[in-house]
Amino acid sequence: MAAAAKHLTPVTLELGGKNPCYVDDNCDPQTVANRVAFFRYFNSGQTCVAPDYILCSPEMQARLLPALQSAITRFYGKDPQSSPDLGRIISEKNFQRLRGLLSCGHVAIGGQTDESDRYIAPTVLVGVQETEPVMQEEIFGPILPIMNVRSLDEAIEFIRRREKPLALYAFSNSSQVVKRVLAQTSSGGFCGNDGFMHMTVASLPFGGVGASGMGSYHGKFSFDTFSHHRACLLRRPGLEKVYALRYPPHTPRNLRVLLAAMETRSCSCALL
């Protein structure tokens, strides 16, 4: 962005952030676990739109943990390290950073690591505090913290007081709950009752807002991003007597006509 600014070149920035995932008490925990686990551990969590943390009640956490364990075992087997479907951490630097985050809260699922293989098991953390490092930076790895909230109001307030995320997810059997999360929060994209499938739909824009970026792309939105929307008005050379109303001296009559033309909402007049 700094390099482009020297040449007054506009940019579209798709950045990252911590993508919240609210799980309502009114939903099937295994369905939620299947979808959250798939999208959290896809590419070993190294996607900018992965669910970064879960917000749910303590009661839903108790139901969700065994469901997450079941989903992880079904996806990657009893020994995820030997699974051909689970990737590795991209670099030694990122591996060390992620391993340091495992000390936050306490490990409820997974937590195993192998530095020689850059392997970190699909992990779920509980008892995490908002001030801990795992809640202060984008995780970008196979670690899923669960934060407890007492109500939907508290979850929305928690999301709103943090930087605007690139994506936001809400799970509930109640469409009203999902719609309320959508209406009362701001994020680059939103998906109800699923993971980052919204970014696979070419007819939807993909991009961030605030700290998660600016502008959007995908499908026609990419074409628009790289296009200049040029205003163009082609006028006939005649009708000069009509257009003369705009020229000085500005008599009260002429001003009334011009103001009336401007104030009529359905008017397409372009006398000025």
Image (cartoon, grey):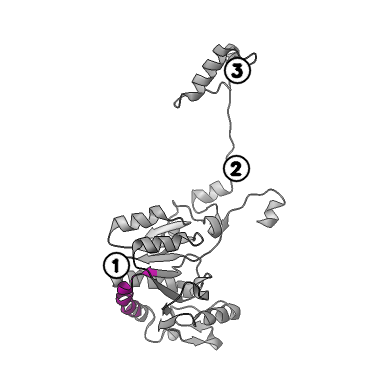
Number of other residues with Cα within 10 Å of mark 3, as a class: few under 14, some 14 to 19, many 20 or more: some
Image point (58%, 14%), residue name: 245
Element marked by disc 2: loop
Q: Say if the magenta span includes residue 219.
A: no
- Residue 62 visible? The answer is yes
Vertical order, 106 against 176 (above or below): below
Residue 260's label in the rendered image is none
Q: What secondary structure is the stretch in magenta mostly built from?
A: helix
Q: Mark 2 points at which residue?
A: 228
Badge nearest the viewer, 3 or 2 = 3
Badge nearest the viewer, 1 or 3 = 1
Q: Mark 3 points at which residue?
A: 246
Place of residue 214 in the rendered image (x, y in percent of width and height, measured from the top left): 55, 54
In the shown orientation, is residue 4 left or right of residue 239?
Answer: right
Disc with the residue nearer the chain's start (3 vs 2): 2
Disc with the residue nearer the chain's start (1 vs 3): 1
Image point (49%, 66%), residue name: 18
Badge nearest the viewer, 2 or 1 = 1
Q: Mark 1 points at which residue?
A: 25
Q: What residue type is labelled 1?
A: Asp
Q: Say if the magenta span includes residue 65.
A: yes
Q: Nearer the viewer, residue 217 or 59?
A: 59
Q: Nearer the viewer, residue 152 or 172?
A: 152
Image point (29%, 56%), residue name: 175
Distance from Cα at disc 2 to Cα at disc 1: 47 Å
The stretch of residues the image draws in magenta is 55-70
Q: What residue type is labelled 2?
A: His
Task: Find the residue positioned furthest to the right.
Answer: 6
